[in-house]
Amino acid sequence: MSVALSVVVPVKDEAANVGPLVREIAAALAGEAPHEILFIDDGSSDGTAGALAALKAEIPALRVLRHPRNLGQSRGIRSGVMAARGGIIITLDGDGQNDPADIPKLLRVLEAEAEVGLVSGVRTKRKDTASRRLASKLGNGLRNWILQDGAADTGCGLKAFRRDLFQAMPYFDHIHRYLIALTLREGWQVRFVPVNHRPRTAGQSKYTNFGRLLVSGADLLGVRWLMRRHRGRAGVEEL
């Protein structure tokens, strides 16, 4: 069957969350174009892989990929995009904090304008700790000052973008934090849509504020260099 949309969800040690999340995604896409749901188990050490495999009979659109060891969120997204059959990719976090019911809102914006390459969710009421919200605010401010990408919430995992756009980007680990800037680099426009944010009900976060800080400096400078060394999207004619 032809597939137009591919939902890509990287997960690690989220055995208690994947069942409800898969069902919510399937319900949110019930009225949409033909689609598939790809979960990428990024080297989980709990029962995540088994829980996902058990759902395949219930949710025919579900596909399950697995990394034999933990490679990180960006690699999980990349593995999903490379395996995807749809021309439109939707990503969201595997902890259940992104609301799948918001997916159609992002799709409508992406479908409405041919020059829009990516639509990013903006979490309006963060259900995180005060320290995480503060760290995110400071990080977003620094990143926006350096990259000038206009993003107020680059950490929101809920995004919709064109598959060929992602494939044109230079891949590096942690790329998922810079998809907005790299979309602009490729000559596409970006739109932002307010989305719901929910508290985590099971499992633990895989990130710490200090851990993000350690990698952000080098990444920011690298992405800034990439943006300066590119002249944007251009058409090609065969004569």
Image (spheres, grey):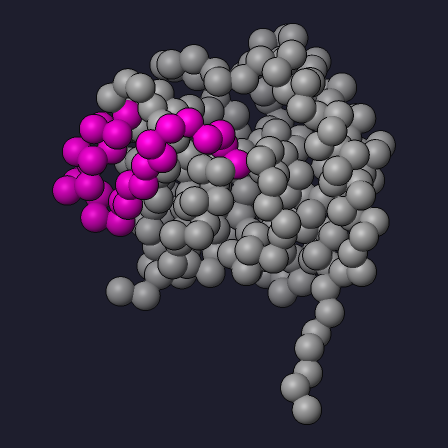
Q: In front here: 184 or 97? A: 184
Segment colored magenta:
48-74
- Tell me the residue at 35%/54% (across/down): 35
The quarter of the picture where residue 21 lies is top left
- Tell me the residue at 38%/14% (across/down): 203
Q: Residue 97 placed where, x, y %?
A: 46, 24
Q: Is residue 47 left or right of residue 231?
A: left
Q: Is residue 98 above or below residue 109?
A: above
Q: Is residue 74 visible?
A: yes
- Tell me the residue at 76%/60% (across/down): 232
The quarter of the picture where residue 38 lies is top left
Check the picture and name the quadrant holding the C terminus.
bottom right
Based on the picture, tell me whether residue 70 belongs to the magenta stretch.
Answer: yes
Q: Is residue 21 left or right of residue 184?
A: left
Q: Is residue 239 above or below residue 74?
A: below
Q: Is residue 235 above or below residue 189?
A: below
Outermost residue to the bottom: 239
Q: In front here: 73 or 201? A: 73
Number of marks in picture: 0
Q: Residue 165 placed where, x, y %?
A: 59, 57
Based on the picture, tell me whether residue 49 belongs to the magenta stretch.
Answer: yes
The quarter of the picture where residue 110 lies is bottom right
Q: In front here: 38 or 218? A: 218
Q: Residue 186 placed where, x, y %?
A: 70, 57
- Tell me the residue at 28%/18% (across/down): 46
Q: Is residue 193 visible?
A: no
Check the picture and name the quadrant holding the N terminus.
bottom left
